[in-house]
Amino acid sequence: MSRAMASLTIKAIFCMQLLPLLIGAFSVIRINRSWDMEEGLLRRQTGHQREFDYFKLSLLWPGTACRNTTKCCSSNACCRSNSPSIFTIHGLWADYNDGTWPACCSGPQFDREQISTLRRPMKKYWPSFSCEATSTCHHEKGSFWAHEWEKHGTCSYPVVHDEYEYFLMTLNVYFKYNVTGVLFEAGYVPSNSEKYPLGGIISAIQNAFHATPELICSGDAVEELRICFYKDLQPRDCASGSIIKSGRVSSGSCPQYVSLPVNGSGGNKQVAGFGLKLCFAVHLLLIFAFI
């Protein structure tokens, strides 16, 4: 994939997808104030969890997330024929400057119907890469989206007031700060053979957003890339993010040279291929059993 082709492709994708989101934001007036005045007073009076300091947008790289896929199902984006080849959303997290974070704050349980108008872009840009249900804050098993809302979204008060606002705001921030586009423009494209300097990836993000990101790796493969924001959603350095000092770069668990593996080279195709072979073998056995 050439740099020019990658740039044009990613810009076309995001421009096409951003338009319906903006139209939906202005045409669908759904200010669902799930937290009433009493809950707001309780939050302020008890001091159960103090107000957060900043947001952290965590993005997943599908090529790394799907490497260990062993099970396919309808909810696992690794198994789709058009599985993602761009950074997708993990979550928008409320964090503290001291490196800790609030979790499972007061607020309503996840209600799928509240985000019915957002499901289409969310399935594409905020997918799950697993078949397993996740734990929620109410000691139940639920969807990936339920987990993110109940654990992180409920702690985003007073910036976020309800579930719909949380997911819409996250999608809009994701599109506005197009990490995949920035990296593709700089020549950092999916590859199973290329290794890229970690400092170069960090610099590309810094130059585009004037903020230092945080990267998490699995081996030498980028697993997550995180961008941090003030409460007004302007970029800022991550409190515990990448550090460039004396010519050396450090970012979480990442080595000096990292990869962006191509999605589909591992888990999903292997699982799909194995499933077809198994199905074929069973049919053969049945045929011979009745001959």
Image (cartoon, helix red, strand yellow):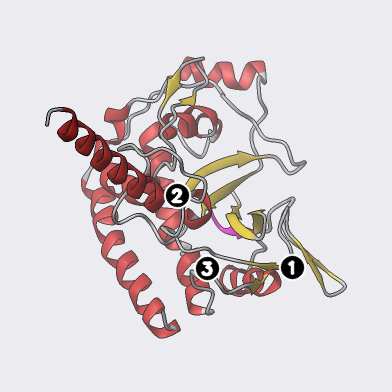
Residue type of the residue flagged with mark 2: Gly
In depth, the one of 72 and 238 nearer the eye is: 72
Which segment did they paint magenta? 232-236
Residue 1 position by quadrant: bottom left
Residue 18 position by quadrant: bottom left
- x and y, in percent, of residue 219 in the image: 67, 55
Look at 68% across and 54% down and name the residue there: 238
- x and y, in percent, of residue 155 in the image: 56, 31
Residue type of the residue flagged with mark 1: Gln
Q: Earlier in the sequence, mark 2 or mark 3?
A: 3
Residue 145 can be seen, yes or no: yes
Look at 26% across and 46% down and name the residue there: 120
What secondary structure predominates along the stretch shown in magenta?
Answer: loop
Look at 59% across and 69% down and name the residue there: 205
- x and y, in percent, of residue 167 in the image: 40, 41
Q: Which residue is mark 3?
A: 192
Residue type of the residue flagged with mark 3: Asn
Residue 49 drawn above or below residue 266:
above
Residue 234 in magenta stretch: yes
Q: Earlier in the sequence, mark 3 or mark 1?
A: 3
Element marked by disc 1: loop
Q: Which residue is mark 1?
A: 256
